[in-house]
Amino acid sequence: MVAFGALPPYRNPVLNIKNTQLDPLDLFDIRSELSEEESMVRESVARFVDDAVIPLMREAFEQHKFPMELVPQVAELGLFGSSIDGYECAGLNSVSYGLICQELERGDSGLRSFVSVQSSLVMFPIYSYGSDEQKDRWLPAMARGEAIGCFGLTEPHGGSDPGNMKTHAKRDGDDWVINGAKMWITNGSIADVALVWAMTDDGVRGFLVEKDTPGFTAQEIENKFSLRASVTSALFLDNVRVPDANVLPGVTGLKGPLSCLTQARYGISWGVIGAAQACLDEALKYSQERVLFDRPVSHSQAMQIRLADMARRITTGQLLALRLGRIKDAGNLTPSQVSLAKWNNCRAALDIARDARDILGGAGISAEYVPVRHMLNLESVITYEGTETVHQLVIGKELTGVNAFG
Ligand code: FAD
């Protein structure tokens, strides 16, 4: 019997069906849906990830260290604040931003997290809600990778309920005095500026706190088993005094931080597909080379079902992300749509990474292969920017009109 894939390429003009071999990581040929610019962006980031990122990531993960040496190259490629127009940013569309996240996370979720925080959680709010002085001061420097930002929303007593914010800021003449603590803050100890969200008499406001401000400290969280190639910190604010000029003037209330999260969650929906693709790629190669019971284990039906299931999840995730990107570029995106994609794609990627780890048998627990690193990283990615439960409740509310959070 001849396998389907072994037939010569053939196109039936009546049925309009081809039998050419498909790309296992792109079964629905998503790449053909991309514009020339989007394809160029994807290809250049993919090359950077293959040449410069993947060779570094295993060691960075083992050493629990973010590879700072990549920052100038990421900046050179125009990946910081890539959706922003002006201020030395690339002004790309949302699909391109998604593709950037996808390719970076194929390397490691830690690097994608770094770029997401810098772009969606710090540059985006400064661009959207900042004063002209704040934009001029921070955006070009952040685009060049010369200034690093972090986003302080989560507090030690519960990130899923940001409305219960204890960090507060009080007016004192022309200044504000901030007290409180933030937990699990990506880039916290390497940031030049922290965007700290704090409760005021008028509601939540965003404050730009520079790293050397007296009373402000950032302490790295050690011994993480996930996102080890990323810096995660606790922030402490003890009577931190900042001038009124450091408040983002354009937004008051939780919609400020939540709008940033929508941007970042959008990028995550794409990013995790990259991690899942890396895992399927490894599982596919390994199962084709691993000979058990006198034949490659990929020849067994049970293995093919598992591999097919990974490809099914990746394909649905890719289609969801692309559609989401097109909706966003048309200006019609809603936060619930982002929640659905973040939930679906993180769940799919995590399940794929866990299964790929198992397909590699004992070797699957070794850092020599990528699945275990992606699997551990994705445990964070499914939790941060809204846990799976939080996104399910967002969809539940969308369907029923009832807020079940309380
Ligand atoms: P909790 O909110 O305490 O949740 C505990 C459990 O309760 C979860 O399983 C949750 O799903 C469940 N739960 C919550 N609400 C409900 C409900 N209504 N019904 C039923 N179950 C519910 N935050 C930032 O501000 N900036 C960052 O840069 C940042 N980076 C991060 C990096 C890493 C590596 C990690 C792990 C976290 C990061 N976070 C950051 C924080 C992250 O967003 C929070 O961890 C997340 O929002 C969950 O908050 P929590 O950890 O306090 O868990």
Image (cartoon, rainbow, N blue to C red):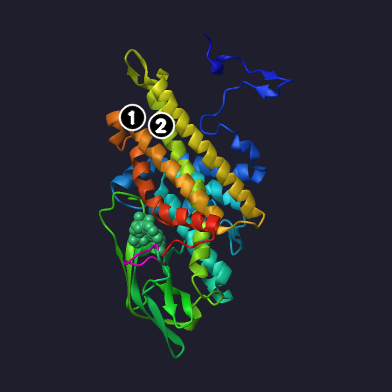
Question: What secondary structure prevails in the magenta region?
Answer: loop
Please state the extent of the stretch shown in magenta in the rendering. 153-160
Q: Residue at x 61, y 22 (%)?
A: 20
Tell me the amino acid under the disc marked 1: Leu
Between 189 and 73, the one nearer to me in the picture: 189
Where residue 66 sits in the image (x, y, percent)? Answer: 36, 53
Where residue 172 sits in the image (x, y, percent)? Answer: 42, 89
Q: Is residue 254 left or right of residue 19?
A: left
Reply above or below: 138 against 178: above
Q: Is residue 231 magenta?
A: no
| Numbered marks: total | 2
Q: Quadrant of the C terminus?
A: bottom left
| Mark 1 CB within 8 Å of ligand 1 | no
In the picture of the structure, the residue carrying the numbered disc 2 is 282
Q: Residue at x 41, y 80 (%)?
A: 169
Please identify, in this view, whether the residue under mark 1 or under mark 2 is nearer the observer: 1
Between 343 and 183, the one nearer to me in the picture: 343
Say what secondary structure mark 1 lies in: loop
